[in-house]
Structure formats: C-alpha cells, structure tokens
C-alpha cells in the first residue's frame, strides 16, 4: 500500500555560481575619468555620458581618434595625460593603455584611490566590465560572458532585442509615474496582482495611450476596494525534462507564480526558470514509492488560491496527457477558483523528436495511440481492447509501462500483432541520462532489462518507429542481432541520430 505523503516545501535557496556579479552604477551627476583617445575609449565615454555622468577625458588633442574628436563636445576634455593625483576626484576610472606596464600603473593608482577601474581590453586590470547592452531605458539589460566570448554576448543581445517590444520603454516610464501610488494604496499581494496585469499589457507590444496614468490609478483603487482578491491556478506542462522545450507562456507563468506545486519528474533545469521568491512544494506521485495523495494536492492548491496566490501546478509532460488535470480542474471549478492550462510537450512527442521519426509516417502508420501502462492499482488497465490496439497500421505509445512491458508484449501478440513488430524503449526522454533500446515486440522484456526500471519509461510499438532507425543502422553498418535489438543508445543529443549515435550495449 502506498503511503500518504503531504506536499513538502522544497524551495531551493542556493544560486548557481556566477563568474561575476551583475551590478548597475548610478552615474547621474557624477564625474568619471577616461584616459586615452582611441575609438574604444570614445565608445566607453559615450556610454558613460548616456548614463548621466560628467566625463573627463585626459588625452592630448593630437592623440584623439577622429571618432573621439567628433563627439568631444559631449565631454570635458583635458589636453594632457592622466596623473595619479586626478583619481580621487572621480567615481570611476576607464583607461586606454597601450602597454601592460601602463595598464598596471593606471590600475594600481585607481585602486589606491578607492576608485573602481576598467582598463580597456586588459581583463587582468579590470575591477568591472562593460557587457553588451539592450537599451529600453529605464529598462537596461546588461549581458556578460566574463570576457570569454564577446561575439556570443552580442548574439544574445540580438536575440533579446527581438523579444522585447520597443514600446517597453514607454511602459517602464509609465511604471515610474504610478509606482508611488500603487505602493501606498495596495498590499503586497494586491501589488503583485496589479503589476502582473501591467506586465501582460506591456508585453503585448502596444504603446500606452495618453490616458494610461489615470486609468491605471483607477485600476489600482479598484483592486484596493476588493478586500478578498481571488487567487488563480495555472496548470503548466513542464515537458519531458529539457528546459529548452518549455513554451514561452510556461516560462512567463513560472516567473509570475507565488507558489509552485511540482511533480517529482520535473527537472531542476525547469525549476531554475521560476521566480526565485516563489514557494516551491514537491507533490510528486511515483508508482511504488511514497507519494502525495491527490486529495492533498487538491487541498493545497485550493488553500493557496483562496489566500489570493498565483499558483502554478507544474506537471511533467503535458497536463492533459495522463496528468490527472481533469480531476484537479473539476475540484477547482467546484470551488469557483479560476484555472487555466498551458500545454507542454508530452513525452511521446519528445521521443519522436529525439529519434527523428514520425509517429504517423504515412508509409507505416495512419494513426497514433497513447495508452497508460498501468492502472491506479499498478497493473495493466483491465478495460483495454487489445485486439483493437494490435493494429499494424497504428503507432502505439505506452506511458509508465516499464514494469508491465512483458505483459504488453504478450497482449499485443495475442491480439494479432506480429512478434517481429519494431519496438523502442526510452527512459528519461530528452535528459542527459536518456537511454534507449531498439528491437522487436517479442523482446520487450530483454529491452527493459537493458534500459532499467529506475527512471520513467516510454514504450513505442509499430512499424513507424523503425523507419529511420533502419536507414541509420545501415549507414553505420549496424546490423540487427538475433534478438532484433540494435542496442541501448544513450545520446544527450540524439535528436540528430545521423550525426550522433552512441551504441553502449547490445541486447
């Protein structure tokens, strides 16, 4: 009998190691020293001036680059070289030094004066660095690769530029205008609800209109008048494990959540994308292991939602595929709690992608079925029509089927499916620990011994699952062995099998 386990707080406090600390200097009205006259120094001087600093440039006129001379009116120019006595008057010091000896001298004098220092293109003498910048000021995003790959930083900046609407600047300015009123008028929970709605509108890409400030103040006052704000539950599909397979909408929900109730199979990579302040509670259910009762999960969701929290119920794969989403939605509906669903990539789709196969390859399968490999009692479901499932023109994927694999093979063969029908077993789909076996239906039990029972398993049966495998095996000179198994394959990047197959065992 499986024990009842209450949801537990599994909040992760630790932050992964940082190569450097991202920080932002407030330079408005402050004086900054720039020594040198190259194009690089000119660019740094422009950045500093854009941040509100009074930039003092120390360099003889005849050593200033053409670019620097064109912008010199924006700075205070000193027609001389820098001196040690100058540092104590400045908030930052930027040096354009030609030699290691000069760089060390510049750095040491700045440090002695207690002034943060950056020597251009000489990381050893930099207490801080300039990264790539996405400018939607007052929203400013800095990107650093710790000097390892500046081109990569620029590429990341271009990606972010495409994601952030230009109107974000106007919305940020609007937030500044109303922030004091919202802070004074609303409680912490009410403020979070207000700002989440604000963010949704900001990312819609539309410019705020002229009446936006009074309209938002009215909205804040309306929220204040509602003494018992309703919470909200979102069922989010976490996919099979690879965080890059999450939808953008799922990431936004994770970053807006107050509470996250997550399944045992949700990967740490996915949880890393969540808002760090969110309470995280493990509510895992695993066959044959201590698990939370569904009633406890329902009660926990309800309690947090009635307290006005934004609750994310984070489910491995897709919530609507063997995820008990229907039971949870029905429970919340009975209590009049708003609930919505963000779909995720179900494990069968991820498996097909990893293998590079079509589950409905038109030469082999005209339909696909998803069937649970065990009932609530841990056995095969009693109401499966195995004669119907044993259709040679259908691809059938069995979820949670590791311990019933041999019974599935027996039922399908008894239903009329050929023992030589291709089959695939995969565990930990899309994860670094992914493992897979290719063979024939009759040898599923052999395959399960190779793949193991420790991790979640999918079994796919049908002619479509071998369509690409046969081509790839021939290309690599891998012939089927007498059991029909090509082998247990454990690639991290098996999405591109033609490029990367790692045969680790033969069954």
Image (cartoon, grey):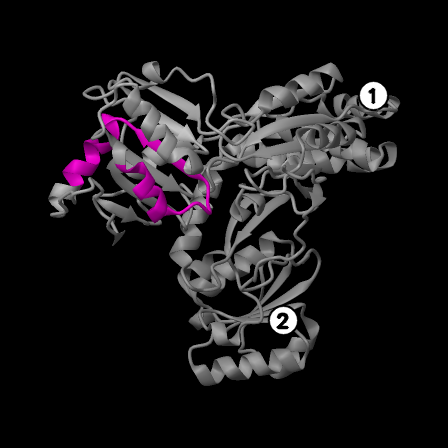
Query: Residue at (55%, 52%) from the top-left corner?
Result: 142
How far from the left and from the top, in percent, is residue 230? 78, 23
Query: Residue at (55%, 48%) from the top-left corner?
Result: 268
Tell me if 110 is positioned left or right of 468 in this view. Answer: right
The mark lying in front, picked from 2 and 1, is 1
Element under label 2?
A: loop
| Residue ID for mark 1 | 222
For the image, the number of numbered tags is 2
> Which range of residues does the magenta coloring cover?
443-472
| Residue ID for mark 2 | 116
Q: Nearer the viewer, residue 22 or 265?
A: 265
Tell me if 190 is positioned left or right of 174 in this view. Answer: right
How far from the left and from the top, in percent, is residue 223? 82, 24
The crowd level at tag 1 (other Cα within 10 Å; few <14, some 14-19, many 20+) is few
Q: Is residue 183 magenta?
A: no
Work out whether residue 278 can be spotted: no
Q: Nearer the viewer, residue 4 or 187?
A: 4
Tell me if 221 is positioned left or right of 145 in this view. Answer: right
Callout 2 touching callout 1 (CB < 8 Å): no
How far from the left and from the top, in percent, is residue 112? 66, 82
Instruction: Answer above or below: position of 385 versus 481.
Output: above
Instruction: Answer above or below: position of 189 versus 433.
Output: above
Decide which of tag 2 and tag 1 comes sooner along the chain.
2
Query: Residue at (55%, 36%) from the top-left corner?
Result: 251
Compute the Cα span from label 2 to label 1: 47 Å
The crowd level at tag 2 (other Cα within 10 Å; few <14, some 14-19, many 20+) is some
Element under label 1?
A: helix
**Hey, which quadrant is residue 33 in on the image?**
bottom right
């Amino acid at each position: 009998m499986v024990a009842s386990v209450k949801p537990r707080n599994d909040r992760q406090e630790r932050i992964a190691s940082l190569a450097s600390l991202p920080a932002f200097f407030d330079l408005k009205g402050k004086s900054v020293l720039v020594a040198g006259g190259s194009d690089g120094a000119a660019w740094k001087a422009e950045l500093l001036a854009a941040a509100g600093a009074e930039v003092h440039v120390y360099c003889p006129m005849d050593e200033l680059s053409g670019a620097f001379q064109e912008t010199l009116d924006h700075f205070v120019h000193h027609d001389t070289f820098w001196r040690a006595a100058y540092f104590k008057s400045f908030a930052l010091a930027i040096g354009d030094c030609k030699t290691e000896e000069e760089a060390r001298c510049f750095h040491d004098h700045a440090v002695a004066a207690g002034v943060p220092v950056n020597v251009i293109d000489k990381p050893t003498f930099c207490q801080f660095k300039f990264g790539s910048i996405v400018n939607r000021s007052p929203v400013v995003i800095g990107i650093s690769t710790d000097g390892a790959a500046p081109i990569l930083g620029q590429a990341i900046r271009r990606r972010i530029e495409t994601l952030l609407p230009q109107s974000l600047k106007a919305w940020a300015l609007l937030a500044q205008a109303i922030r004091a009123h919202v802070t004074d008028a609303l409680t912490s929970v009410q403020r979070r609800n207000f700002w989440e709605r604000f963010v949704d509108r900001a990312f819609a890409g539309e410019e705020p209109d002229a009446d936006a400030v009074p309209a938002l103040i009215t909205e804040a006052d309306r929220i204040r008048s509602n003494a018992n704000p309703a919470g909200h539950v979102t069922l989010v599909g976490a996919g099979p494990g690879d965080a890059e397979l999450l939808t953008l909408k799922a990431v936004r929900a994770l970053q807006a959540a107050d509470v996250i109730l997550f399944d045992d199979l949700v990967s740490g990579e996915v949880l890393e994308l969540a808002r760090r302040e969110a309470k995280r509670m493990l509510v895992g259910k695993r066959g044959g292991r201590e698990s939370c009762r569904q009633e406890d999960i329902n009660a926990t969701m309800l309690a947090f939602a009635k307290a006005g929290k934004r609750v994310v119920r984070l489910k491995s794969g897709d919530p609507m595929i063997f995820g008990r989403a229907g039971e949870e939605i029905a429970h919340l509906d009975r209590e009049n709690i708003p609930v919505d669903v963000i779909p995720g990539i179900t494990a069968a789709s991820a498996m097909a992608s990893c293998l590079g196969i079509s589950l409905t390859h038109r030469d082999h399968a005209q339909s696909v079925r998803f069937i649970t490999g065990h009932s609530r009692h841990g056995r095969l479901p009693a109401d499966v029509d195995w004669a119907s499932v044993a259709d040679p023109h259908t691809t059938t994927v069995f979820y949670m089927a590791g311990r019933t694999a041999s019974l599935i093979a027996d039922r399908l063969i008894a239903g009329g499916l050929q023992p030589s029908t291709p089959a695939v077993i995969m565990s930990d789909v899309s994860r670094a620990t992914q493992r897979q076996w290719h063979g024939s239906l009759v040898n599923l039990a052999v395959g399960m011994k190779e793949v193991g029972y420790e991790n979640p398993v999918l079994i796919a049966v049908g002619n479509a699952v071998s369509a690409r495998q046969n081509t790839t095996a021939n290309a690599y000179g891998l012939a089927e062995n007498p059991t029909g198994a090509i082998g247990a394959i454990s690639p991290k990047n098996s999405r591109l099998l033609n490029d990367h197959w790692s045969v680790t065992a033969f069954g």
